[in-house]
Image (tube, helix red, strand yellow):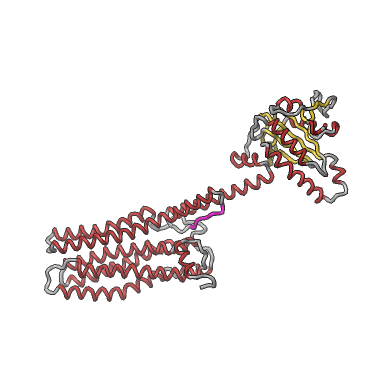
Amino acid sequence: MPPGQTVREAVGELLHPGATGVSGATLWRVGELFVALAIVVTNLVGAVVVVIMGTFVIPIPPIPDGAHVRVVNIVAAVVYVAVAVPVGMLVGIRGLFRLRNWLLAERPATPAEVRTVIRAPVRLFFVQMELWLGAAVVFAVLDARYSTTFGLRIAVAVALTGLSTAACAYLLTERLLRPAAARALATGTPERLAVPGVASRAVLAWGLGTGVPVTGLVLLGAAELAGGSASHTELAVVMVVLGAIALTVGLLAVSLAARATADPVDAVRRGLGRVQEGDFGVAVPVYDGTQLGQLQLGFNQMVGGLAERERMREALGTYLDPDVAERIVSEGTRLEGEEVDVTVMFVDVRDFTAFAEGRPAHEVVAVLNNLFGRIVPLVHDQGGRVDKFVGDGLLAVFGAPRKLADHADRALVAAIAIAQAAQGELGIGIGLNSGRVVAGNVGGAGRLEFSVIGDVVNTAARVEEATRMTGDVILLSGATKRLLARPWPPLTERHDVALKGKTETVVLYAYPESE
C-alpha cells in the first residue's frame, strides 16, 4: 500500500466514493478483498440456511431411513460448498482482473472498462445463480432416490435460497464497487448500460423480502393440497422459519436497495446546498449506472455551467458596469434601445497633458487607475454606472439601464463625494446634465457597447468643459437643477457662459463648495 494511505482511508473510499482520493493500487487491493468476502460470506450464510431447512424444517415424507437422508444431505452440502464457493469467488473475481491494470495506471477508463465496472455486480449475480442452480439439480437427483417429493422440496429450497443469496451479493458488490465506478464514470455515463435500473432494484428488494418466502409457502401449500403428509407442527415450523427469513432478508435487501437509491440523491442534495451558498466548485462522484448516475452527471454538468456563468459574470463585471453585465447575462446581447430619462456625469482631469509630460507611462497609468479606483465605487454607491472611460476622464449615467426616479439627486450626491475624494495631486472638473436619451447597444460587426446616445450626453460634456472657464469643480445644467428634489444649499448661477457647439443658451449652476 502506498505510504500515507491506510486501510481506514481505503474503507472510507468504499463507503464514500471520492472522499479520500486513495490510489488505484490501494483501491484494487481493498476492493478485491471486500468483494471476495462479500461473495464468501453471503454464500456461506445461504448454505447454512439450506442445511438448516433441509435438516430441521422441510418435512420428509415417510421413507425407511429419514435420519440417513439428512446425514447424506449435510455431507453433500459441505462438500458442494467447499468446492462451489471458492470456484464462484475465483470466477467472479477473475472477471474483474481486467480492471487491475486500469486502476494501477491511474488513467481514464475505456468504454470497455466502464462496462466491466458497471456490469460486474450483474455478472457476479449470474455466476452465483449458476452454481446454486447446479446445487439444486445435484440435491434433486440425490434425494430423488429416496423420495421424489422430498427431492423436489430440497431443490426448490436450494433454488430460492440461492436466488436470495445471489441477489444480496449483487446489492453488496454494487456498493463495494462504487469507488471504481466513480473513477470509470468520471468523464460521463454511457448512453446504454445493461444494468438494472432504479425500478428493478425496488422489484429485486421486494422479491427477496416477500416474493421468495411467499413462493416457498405457496409451493408448500400446493404440495400439501396434492396429498402431502406433513403434520400441523411441521407446517407451523416451516411458516415460522420462512417468516423469519422474510423479515431478516427482506430488511437487509430493502436497506441495501434503499441506500443504493438514497445515497446518490443525498449527495446531490448536499451539493445543491453548497451551490445555494455560492460554492460552484462542488461536484458529486458519479458511480451509479442507472438513472441516478445520469442525475449525478447532470448535476455536475449543471454546476459546471453555473460556474462558467459566474466566471463570465465576473469577467464582464471587470470590463463592464455590473448592471450592464447582469443584463447581458440574463437577456443576451440583443438589448434593444429605449428612451429613458437620465442624468449624465462627465468627469475630467484638468491639465492632464502637462501632468503626463515627462512622466513614465506606467506611472501615469497608475495615478489614473488610483483616481478611478476612488471614483467608480462612489458612482455605484448612488446607483449609477460608469458608461466608459475616455482617456483621462469618464462618463457616468444615472438612470440606465436601471431606472432611477431621483437620478438627478443621486448624480449630485456622487459628484460631491467625487470632488472630495479626488482632492490631491490631480484637479478635476465635473459636469452634470439631465434629459431623455436612447439607451441600448451601439456598434456593429459583432462588436457592441451598451451606451446612451443623445444631445443630453453632448451637453454634459460641454458643461464639464465650462468648469475650466468658471473655475468650479461641479457645474450642473438648469435641466438637472429643476429635477433636484432633496433640500440642497442654494446653487450659484454662472452667467454669460457659452457652451461650445450649442446654439441655445444653457443655464449653468455651481455647487457652493466648488466656488
User: Could you say which quadrant of the image residue 458 lies in?
Assistant: top right
Q: Is residue 364 above or below residue 219?
A: above
How many marks can you see?
Answer: 0
Magenta residues: mostly which secondary structure?
A: loop
Residue 241 in the figure: left or right of residue 295? left
Q: Is residue 475 above or below residue 101?
A: above
User: Could you say which quadrant of the image residue 442 lies in?
Assistant: top right
Determine if the magenta segment contains residue 487. no
Location of residue 230 in the rendering, given as x and y in whole percent from the top left corner? 13, 63
Q: Is residue 149 above or below residue 503?
A: below
Q: Which of these two is toward me, 256 or 444?
A: 256
Query: Which part of the image, by quadrant, shows the C terminus?
Result: top right
Location of residue 50 in the rendering, given as x and y in whole percent from the top left corner? 25, 68
Q: Which of these two is toward me, 242 or 512?
A: 512
Residue 192 in the figure: left or right of residue 343? left
Q: Which residues are magenta?
A: 280-285
Q: Is residue 433 visible?
A: yes
Location of residue 266 in the rendering, given as x and y in whole percent from the top left corner? 45, 53
Q: Which of these two is toward me, 486 or 150?
A: 486
Location of residue 491 in the rendering, given as x and y in whole percent from the top left corner? 78, 27
Residue at x 41%, y 62% (from the top left corner): 175
User: Could you say which quadrant of the image residue 422 lies in?
Assistant: top right
Residue at x 73%, y 45% (from the top left corner): 373
Residue at x 51%, y 66% (from the top left corner): 22
